[in-house]
Image (cartoon, helix red, strand yellow):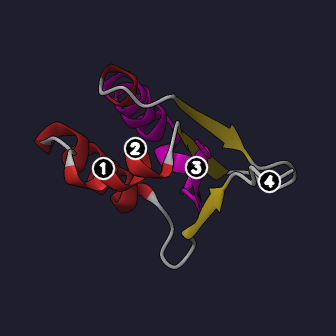
Amino acid sequence: MAKVIFSVQYEISSNKKEEYFGVVKELKNLLIADGLDNYTVYEVKGKPNNYQEIYTFSSSEAFDQFDDNQNERLNILINKLNDLTTENSTKYTTLYEVTEI
């Protein structure tokens, strides 16, 4: 089965950094408890206050089911993250593992 990586990159205001870290910490705990393979947050080199969330799914089926199975607390945290981001700075990427090589 091919893995799927979903990433979200955005900028947050420097004065919201502590709140951001708190939300991400809680989000990570919920995502791992829900069975996500891996969830990691990176700061983008050379771009202060720019972060990238990486969600790793074991298969395209797991990725497809992710949106269908979100609980209410997860939605609240994702909405909070959206509120912390700088307007028009969010970029989404979905990568499918190449299994033919």
**CA distance for labels 4 and 1:** 24 Å
Which of the two marks, 2 or 4, is nearer to us in this view? 4
In the image, which residues are magenta? 1-30
Marks 4 and 1 close (CB-CB < 8 Å)? no
Q: Are marks 2 and 1 in contact (CB under 8 Å)?
A: yes
Cα separation between marks 2 and 4 = 20 Å
101 to 30, vertically: above or below: below
For the residue marked with disc 2, what is the amino acid?
Ala
Q: Amino acid at mark 4?
A: Glu
Mark with earlier residue (2, 3): 3
Type of amino acid at the residue the image marks with label 1:
Gln
Give the residue number, with chain letter if any, for mark 3: 4
- Residue annotated with mark 4: 100
Disc 2 secondary structure class: helix
| Residue 25 image point, x, y percent | 43, 26
Image quadrant assignment for residue 29: top left
Left-right relation of 78 to 86: left
Label 2 close to label 3 by CB (< 8 Å): yes
> On the image, numbered disc 2 is attached to which residue?
62
